[in-house]
Amino acid sequence: MKKFLSIALVLALVLSFGVTAFASSATPAGEEIDPATYTEPTTVTISKKYTAPNGGKNPAETFAFSDLTCIEVTDAAEGVTKANAPVPTIASIAFTEGEATADGVTKTAAISLPTYTSVGVYTYEFNEEIPETKTAGVTYNETKLYLVVTVIQGSDGLLRVAAVHCEGSHDKGKKGQEPKTDLFDNKYENGTLAVTKTVTGNMGDKSKYFDVTVTFTAASGEAINSTITYKGGQYTQAVTVENNTATIKVKHGDTVTFENVPEGVTWKVEEASYTSEGYDAAQYSTQTKEMAAGANDTCTITNNKTTTVDTGITLDSLPYILIVAVVLSAAVVMFINKRRSEV
């Protein structure tokens, strides 16, 4: 009878902690624990969902986590404290270039559990590591996380991990008051830049190619790790973006579109000078701007070349010349008629 009550107590405890956001090798909730066949879980998993909501191509990225630090131990045997509590370890999660999607791709990292020597509730603090140089366009998860491991004693006298879950955030509330979850989001955001060429003026050459340099600069503390591509234009030579710079050739009516420009990156468009060829200084609709998530930025470059056509007679003064000619002709006629009348 006592053995039956002990097993029932263990089952009640396990079921009470059974709502867990982690996958593990523990016995599924609702099934009896058989001391003869029960296998102690050695790992649990944490999940990361990586999205590219603007349809961009994410750079390769490895998301790592800090070491877990025990911040609290309750209901443990005498002498067991947070200072000497066993500590789990956590692996990183890697995504390859272009792997993220608009709906998101989810991967897991294993948390390896240590060997516990005492019952108790062990609470650990950890967070996603923010790299010293962030990847431009990537949003990192800066929420502080808590891993809670509940260890109980089974009817056979052996310790059992009854439940593991993640909870809480110092940024959002007190530990123990947040929903339990094992899914943490990251995203990569980007936009596009369209560069258009317009040539005006009666001497503007609409078949001429103009050299334009486009540079992309990351914000302080960030690096451009994305592959920025471009399409459009009539110039046949392939152009690549190297060292975050591209030189393109465009003529009247061309539009070249740069894609996968990371959010937060500043772009600048600068055309070579053609004033020695009689063109006015280039005019830009917008020459530089910081890329916003999902933005479709545009820059129109206008080159004007106008000259005065020398016809010998200024067309604007021709009407006045004709009036003077008529007046003079009338005066001559009147003079001749007067001379005749006097004879």
Image (tube, rainbow, N blue to C red):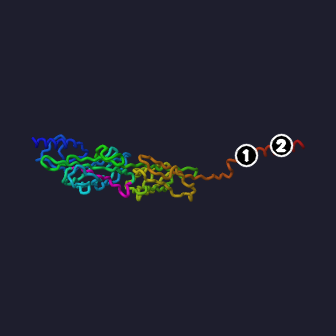
Q: Which one is nearer the viewer's eye here, 157 or 231? A: 157
**Extreme-right residue of the structure:** 343
Q: CA distance from mark 2 to mark 1?
A: 21 Å
**Residue at 31% across, 44% down:** 177
The amino acid beneath tag 2 is Met
**Residue at 56% across, 55% down:** 281
Tell me the mark number nearer the camera, choosing from 2 and 1: 1
**Residue at 24% across, 42% down:** 19
**In this figure, what is the number of numbered marks?**
2
Question: In the rendered structure, which segment of residues is drawn in magenta?
Answer: 120-135
Q: Which mark is residue 146?
A: none
**Picture coordinates of residue 153, whole percent (x, y):** 16, 48
For the residues bearing labels 2 and 1, Cβ distance under 8 angstroms: no
Q: Which one is nearer the viewer's eye here, 323 or 136? A: 136
First along the sequence among labels 2 and 1: 1
Q: Which mark is residue 320?
A: 1
**Toward which corner of the image does residue 280 lie, by quadrant?**
bottom right
Q: Quadrant of the C terminus?
A: top right
Q: Quadrant of the N terminus?
A: top left
Disc 1 element: helix
**Picture coordinates of residue 218, whole percent (x, y):** 42, 56
Q: Which residue is mark 2?
A: 334
Q: Is residue 33 magenta?
A: no
**Picture coordinates of residue 52, whole percent (x, y):** 35, 47
Label 2: few (<14), some or many (≥20) within 10 Å? few
**Extreme-left residue of the structure:** 1
- Name the side, left or right, on which 119 lies relative to 63: left
